[in-house]
């Protein structure tokens, strides 16, 4: 695509997340259609809107509709940005990947936190060998009908994949409240836990990296969003001062969705790569443990 060309898109799904996407999409794209159909009752959207002037489709519909809508969009020759998870079935996810490749289209999943500037900064900070990773993501959202691992676990797995390839880890889950609260345990080059809950009284998001030289603490809900706590070299000696210094990074965490959309825009301009491989491995992990 020419770098100066304006890209026409369609937004499919205009619920809570679709409305958030719309605010940022209009900064980078010309939104030709907004489709808020109940796709389960009224049929797939391509039967209801004109496609000729649309280069890409952004999909923010219920999880169970993703596969069918993404496939139809790709078959129609449209690039796709889909809300996470791409699908809940590895075979379907792989099929979509191969279809996008065959038709030379961009297929990207909107893993919001993977576009966080604070988390990208955390990857650059030297705290020695990572010994353990702990993550927590919670909402007050028991009204959500999907299970918590697909809704929130997919977010945390996408972050973990930034730090350690998921393919090198083994996973199991422990349910505290079925489909609503639980922990995914992982083991391999690094060990740790991903705790997710739809029963929190408020939103909570935290990532902690425990390293040989210190600890990194990230929270999208706190200020500063990123802290690094450095240890003494002889930190195992009880009674001595453990922490030598703390460094704080005041990085804005309110624009991660904007960064995700900018990445898709650049991918359409051949300036970034799709994250389809991450979407596949996240789906594969969750499919095996749920």
Image: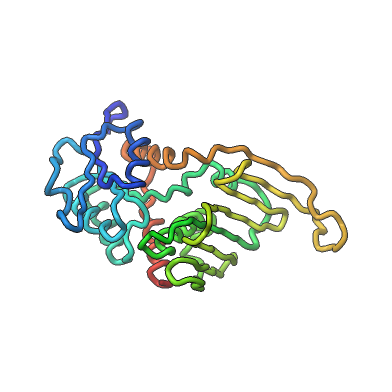
**Place of residue 221 in the rendered image (x, y in percent of width and height, measured from the top left):** 56, 46
Residue at coordinates 28% horizontally, 48% vertically from top-left?
Answer: 59
Vertical placement of residue 55 versus 61, above or below:
above
Vertical placement of residue 233 versus 18, above or below:
below
**Place of residue 288 in the rendered image (x, y in percent of width and height, measured from the top left):** 40, 72
Left or right placement of residue 12 versus residue 284 in this view: left
Between 235 and 149, the one nearer to me in the picture:
149
Residue at far top of view: 4
Vertical placement of residue 132 versus 273, above or below:
below
Vertical placement of residue 218 versus 239, above or below:
above
Residue at coordinates 22% horizontally, 58% vertically from top-left?
Answer: 68
Between 141 and 13, the one nearer to me in the picture:
141
Left or right placement of residue 213 versus residue 102 in this view: right
> How is the rendered protein coloured?
rainbow
Left or right placement of residue 24 versus residue 125 in this view: left
Residue at far right of view: 239
Residue at coordinates 29% horizontally, 66% vertically from top-left?
Answer: 91
Name the image quarter holding residue 226: top right
Observer able to see residue 226: yes
**Place of residue 85 in the rendered image (x, y in percent of width and height, measured from the top left):** 36, 57
**Place of residue 217 in the rendered image (x, y in percent of width and height, measured from the top left):** 63, 51
Between 232 and 48, the one nearer to me in the picture:
48
Left or right placement of residue 264 versus residue 163 in this view: left
Quadrant showing the N terminus: top left
Name the image quarter holding residue 98: bottom left
Quadrant showing the C terminus: bottom left
Observer able to see residue 106: no
């Amino acid at each position: 695509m020419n770098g100066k060309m304006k890209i026409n898109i369609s937004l499919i799904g205009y619920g809570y997340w679709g409305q958030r996407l719309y605010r940022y999409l209009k900064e980078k794209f010309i939104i030709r259609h907004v489709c808020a159909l109940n796709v389960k009752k009224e049929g797939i959207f391509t039967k209801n809107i004109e496609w000729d002037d649309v280069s890409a489709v952004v999909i923010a519909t219920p999880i169970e509709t993703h596969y069918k809508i993404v496939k139809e969009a790709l078959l129609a020759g449209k690039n796709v940005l889909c809300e996470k998870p791409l699908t809940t079935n590895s075979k379907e996810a792989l099929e979509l990947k191969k279809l996008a490749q065959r038709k030379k289209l961009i297929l990207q999943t909107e893993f919001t936190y993977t576009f966080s500037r604070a988390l990208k900064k955390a990857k650059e900070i030297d705290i020695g060998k990572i010994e353990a990773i702990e993550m927590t993501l919670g909402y007050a959202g028991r009204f959500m009908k999907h299970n918590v691992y697909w809704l929130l676990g997919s977010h945390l797995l996408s972050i973990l994949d930034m730090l350690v390839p998921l393919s090198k880890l083994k996973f199991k889950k422990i349910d505290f409240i079925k489909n609503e609260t639980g922990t995914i345990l992982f083991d391999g080059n690094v060990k740790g836990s991903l705790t997710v809950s739809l029963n929190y009284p408020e939103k909570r998001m935290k990532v902690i990296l425990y390293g040989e030289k210190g600890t990194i603490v990230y929270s999208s809900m706190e200020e500063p969003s990123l802290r690094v706590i450095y240890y003494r070299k002889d930190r195992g000696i009880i009674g001595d001062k453990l922490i030598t210094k703390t460094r704080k990074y005041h990085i804005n965490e309110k624009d991660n969705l904007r960064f995700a959309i900018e990445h898709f825009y650049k991918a359409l301009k051949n300036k970034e790569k799709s994250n389809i491989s991450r979407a596949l491995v996240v789906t594969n992990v969750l499919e095996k443990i749920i």
